[in-house]
Amino acid sequence: MVSPHSRHPERHRYDRIGWLRAAVLGANDGIVSTASLIIGVAAAAASPATVLVAGSAGLVAGAMSMAAGEYVSVSSQSDTEQADIARERAELHEDPVAEERELATIYRARGLDAELARQVAAQLTAHDALGAHARDELGLSDELAAQPLQAALVSGASFAVGAALPLAVATFAPQPALGIAVAATSLVFLALLGALAARTGGAPLGVGAARVTFWGALAMAATAGVGALFGTTVG
């Protein structure tokens, strides 16, 4: 006999939010920052060797910075979550009756009548009081819990992969067209990244690609202007 769950499978994407955000942010930053750095240095009339050294240094420094920043940021989020859970655990120990009433109030606000809300609160409290409060009062769940190490590794690795793309183009592009080649291919990479992220997250592909490409183009244009300005000044 086929179970109801197998007849009607549901696929949700909310459990991807943590690593997807870190991966997209890292790859996007890797492409944009490294491409912008290469374009800016090239616009200042630097030698090909100098451009590649700057791009390589940007890759390594950016990947480490991204990983460290994500770890610190997500660790702070995790600390806050754990502090809230600890506070809730203490309140359950001090006054479990008041905490059960608090749950019932939450369920009434969501549409249950008073008696049903009371029954649901009583049953969930008996089953897992702390879990019920973490989920329904604090909005926390195991699927969405902050994971600092995962965020750091995904961000650092995706930054390095993203940064390697414009760096590879700069390695093989002819010197006169280096800036244009890096800018054009980086915009293509950004559009593909935005579309891929949108598809993974269930969002419209065009919107995801357009917003990433727009901000990337703006960053590269600004850096090229700075490089050209300083290159002209030095010259």
Image (spheres, rainbow, N blue to C red):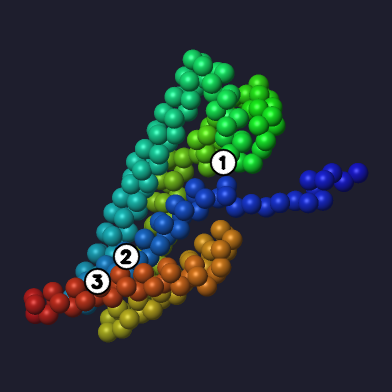
Task: Give the quadrant of the N terminus.
Answer: top right
- Quarter of the image where one finds residue 31: bottom left
Circle 1 packing at 10 Å, graded few (<14), some (14-19), many (20+), is few
The CA span between labels 2 and 1 is 33 Å
Q: For the residue labelled by badge 2, is the local secondary structure a helix, a strand or a loop?
A: helix
Q: For the residue labelled by badge 1, is the local secondary structure a helix, a strand or a loop?
A: loop
39 lies left or right of 128: left
173 lies left or right of 128: left
Q: For the residue labelled by badge 3, is the local secondary structure a helix, a strand or a loop?
A: helix
Residue designated by label 1: 143
Looking at the picture, which amino acid does disc 1 mark? Glu
Q: Nearer the viewer, mark 2 or mark 3?
A: 3
Q: Are marks 1 and 3 in contact (CB under 8 Å)?
A: no
> Quick one: which residue is furthest to the top in this view?
94
194 lies left or right of 231: right
Sooner in the amino-acid sequence: mark 2 or mark 3: 2
151 lies left or right of 55: right
Looking at the picture, which amino acid does disc 2 mark? Thr
Q: Is residue 6 above or below residue 35?
A: above
Where residue 227 sits in the image (x, y, percent)? 19, 74
Q: Nearer the viewer, mark 2 or mark 1?
A: 1
> Quick one: which residue is furthest to the front in this view?
114
The CA span between labels 1 and 3 is 39 Å
Tell me the residue at 39%/73% (across/down).
214
Residue designated by label 3: 223
> Quick one: which residue is furthest to the left in this view?
234
The CA span between labels 2 and 3 is 11 Å
Tell me the residue at 40%/33% (across/down).
79
Report if residue 124 is visible in the image: no
Residue designated by label 2: 34
Task: Give the quadrant of the C terminus.
Answer: bottom left
Sooner in the amino-acid sequence: mark 2 or mark 1: 2
